[in-house]
Amino acid sequence: MKGDKEQISPSRKLILGFLSVIAVGVFLLMLPFSLKEGKSLNFLEALFTVVSAVCVTGLTVVDVSEVFSPLGDVILIALIQIGGLGVMTFSSIVFLLAGQKMTLYTRILLKEERNANSVGEILNFVRLMLLTVFIIESIGAVILIHEFRKIMPHEQAIYYGIFHSISAFCNAGFSLFSNSLENFRGNSVISLTISYLIILGGMGFAIINSFIMMIRKGVSRFTLTSKLAIHISMILTFGGAVLFFLLEFSNSATLSPLPWSEKIISSVFQSVTLRTAGFNTIPLGNLRSATVFMACIWMLIGASPGSTGGGIKTTTLGVILFYVIGIIRGKEHVEIFNRRLDWDVMNKALALLVVSLSYIALVILFLLVLEPFSMEKIVFEVVSAFGTVGLTMGITPYLSVTSKLVIIVTMFVGRLGPMTIALALGEKKKKARVQYPKEDILIG
């Protein structure tokens, strides 16, 4: 028995956990009580929706607001919450609430899933994370309920407020409105609340924990990972807002007709949601090609480590940038904020980037062969799926069966691929006894 348990690596355990949740989710969503009267859902549509929810992506092939019953929406938001927190993390929360003890093996799995610093700290980390998530999502829900009450009945406002708060914090991008949040473009309270939830969810629980400790004890205990993630996130958020504003300012189909206040809020909102969430307040099909290109870069980068978002992560980008800067300046070591990085970190970051770009390129090529849509729309769709963003230029429901299956796999790889690749690269191998002679290769 012991040998069998040791054969299941943490990365495989995580994959099996996600697959199990997906299987249960598909079964539940296909039951009659999950659907509105007169509506039906085939297996592929259910699978696509559930994978998108568990992988907190937001791409859909059906109109969620028209197909699912209130109970179906509850199942959907539960899948989003599980996917956002992580299957192992959510399972551990259930065990803790039931008064069960957490085994060492479970703590190791959680450490891998949540990128915690040590196995010993993971129990307190999970407890604090549960409390933090509840508080943040509750505050967001209260604000959204207050705003939704202005346009819908009280009970529906509560229902919609809770759903969108969880969806935003988990960076899922699922909405009960057919056109996402386009009708609320002029509502600064809703736009900023959703943005705040997306930012906190995409920041990572370790960083949120550091902020909490700073507020409670007045001591700044930010790790190098936290510092780098915060700096890169701020640059991407504000830089993205400025770029989006400049690129779309004169576009009559997006920002041009809007008042100045809405131009600014929409630019900030789209900059935030581009990296992880999948909500939109303007029609994405009308974006200029330059904006689409920028959006693809932002979607590829994604959120921060240990967060609810996807992508290659902000720290991966940061490490590679500092590495390139170090080479240009002729430095022997990579230095970030007065700290020297180990070369293993550099190797993992570069490998993660190369593998991610290679996978995306192959999927894009595959879909270009299968589909009649423009390259721009297909590239946007694939990068959005891999980065678990969920934004689309309107082609998702019209993809062929084969392409939908490819997008399903891409969402799954995007949610678990970078993490499992990092785990595989992190496994230390025995040093080879035989070392071959060195020889240089000309570069550039």
Image (tube, helix red, strand yellow):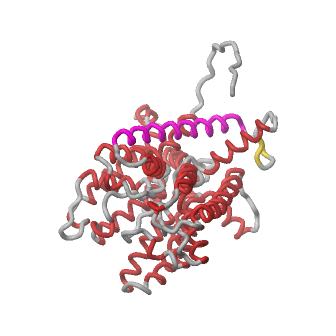
Please name the predominant secondary structure of the magenta segment in the image. Answer: helix
Q: Is residue 38 left or right of residue 294?
A: left
Q: Nearer the viewer, residue 92 or 334?
A: 334
What's drawn in magenta, residue-wise? Answer: 342-370
Q: Position of residue 285 (x, y in %)?
A: 44, 60
Q: Nearer the viewer, residue 329 or 119?
A: 329
Identified at 34% across, 45% down, the residue is: 371
Q: Position of residue 269 (x, y in %)?
A: 56, 67
| Quarter of the figure with residue 80 | bottom left
Identified at 38% across, 42% down, the residue is: 367
Instruction: Assess whether residue 161 is covered by the magenta stretch.
Output: no
Residue 306 in view here: no
Number of numbered callouts drawn: 0
| Quarter of the figure with residue 160 | bottom left
Q: Nearer the viewer, residue 275 or 128?
A: 275
Q: Is residue 198 left or right of residue 362?
A: right
